[in-house]
Amino acid sequence: MRLLTHNMLSSNIKGVTNGFPLLIEAVKVVEKEVDFNEDFLKNMFVKVEWKALVEASRTLGYTELPESAEASMLDSDEFLRKFHHALLELHLEDGALVCPETGRKFPVSKGIPNMLLHEDEV
Amino acid sequence: MVVITGGGGVAVCTCQYSRRLFCGGPTLSIPRTNRTVDSQPALLIGCTTSRRRITHTRTSSSSSSSGGGRRRRMTTSAAATSATETLKKGIAEFYDQSSGVWEDVWGDHMHHGFYEPASDVSLSDHRSAQIRMIEESLRFASLSDDSVQKPKSIVDVGCGIGGSSRYLAKKYGAKAQGITLSPVQAQRAQELASAQGLDANVSFQVADALNQPFPDGQFDLVWSMESGEHMPDKTKFVNELVRVAAPGGTIIVVTWCHRDLSPSEESLLPDEKNLLDKICDAYYLPAWCSTADYVKLLQSHSLEDIKSEDWSQYVAPFWPAVIKSALTWKGITSLLSSGWKTIRGALAMPLMIQGYKKGLIKFAIITCRKPAL
């Protein structure tokens, strides 16, 4: 699971008011190279929740992203490369996504998160 | 009973009621025990009327029947939840088991093709017909190809092995999320995405369409291609589709429905319900609804441009083609090595044809748009 995906997922357990962002428990993290696409990154920048991305990338062991970011930084190639790496090249292979309110763990196995709720969470 | 032998033969049904193949007698049952016929391994499958003549005992294996005894002792709401959980588990297992077989014979699109009415199609036309189904659906929804207006984020609800997700992501240069109950499908979908260099654009999760794991208003295009029929709570299903649609976003649902009821009708006729029940068992479907029901549900939200159409005439060649492919050597051997859930699904195919011929089953498209802010 890439952090681009993580940035779109939230806990939808009954009663949870803010299930985003999910915390990450990393058991196995893999780096996979992805072609650099400047336009894609610039389009994504407006949609990405930056704080969630920074937190998540730190959990996966990448500390290069700045705490906050603005559109003007997209002119910097160095910034784009760091953004690219964090968003697309870090993979959580095994571990869990954790609901920020209830602590419930959604397992991630072979890169696929299982977001199914139990009967009593619906 | 129907005998499918390791030698590739298909025998005629010897049900006590008729000698037709796939007699469609009351509830097809698949005993798990294998036997040999003429020293070839064979699977014996019988309708319940002929069951008594099969010497091995029937195991209580189908999810719908095994739930029956327990259900009567539970309260109604607990029973309903348990039935839903059983259904979801059944759906996941059905697709875990069957996806590989389907992909092997038909490729990565697990939906009907769109054909010219009364056309003569050969096996090679089906792949392009499945692509056409996607394109016709987008056209029906008046979805734009324009670079500013085209969808940038897509959710594929009930994504199978990701055929639509990958196609749409590629077509629009968008990012797509696919959700499915089947872990095997999600894994396979991701593998195929990687193999096609779409790793950055599409990702898949195991998740429930009735509780989508996304915040509100995420997606410009909410796509449900032949998954609606699996949803046990149509209201919740539609609510979630609407919730995750972005302002100005488009919702496209292509699904199996039963015929609309006339104003004087309270429900379908008994033999119509009977036929649908048999299909439900084989395909892990909850109760069916009509196209009109979907339209009514969408109307209860403030949505624009709600449209629906009956596309049954455009999909008519599909089930006969699937049956034909199942009866090839490749089809039969794939089925035999899959499992009884898949086989039972295969045996229910003539019931689908019956349903369409009676005008009971409809292939419907329903689309609408969420108002822009």
Image (cartoon, coloured by chain):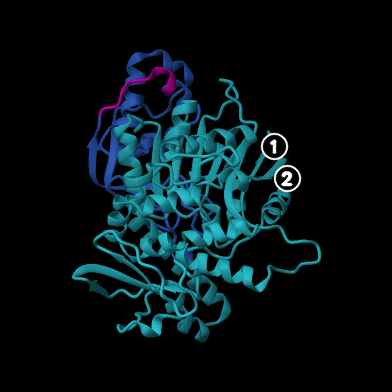
Residue drawn 48% across the image and 73% down it: B82
Chain shown in cyan = B
Precedes in sequence: disc 1 or disc 2: 2
The color chain A is rendered in: blue
Is B239 rendered above or below residue B43?
above
Image quadrant where residue B340 sits: bottom left
Residue B373 x/y as whole percent: 69, 34
Inspect the magenta stretch and tell me whether residue A34 lies in it. yes
Q: CA distance from mark 1 to mark 2?
A: 8 Å
Q: How many numbered discs sit on the rendered protein?
A: 2
Count residues near mark 2 (Cα–Cα under 10 Å), then give few for <14, some for 14-19, many for 20+: few
Q: Position of residue A60 (x, y in %)?
A: 28, 39
Q: Which residue is mark 1?
A: B371
Provide residue B28's location: percent of width, then percent of height. Answer: 45, 72
Q: What residue span does the magenta drawing correspond to?
A: A33-40
- Whether residues under marks 1 and 2 lie with C-beta atoms below 8 angstroms apart, the answer is yes
**In front of the other: B72 or B26:** B26
**The N terminus of chain B: image quadrant:** bottom left
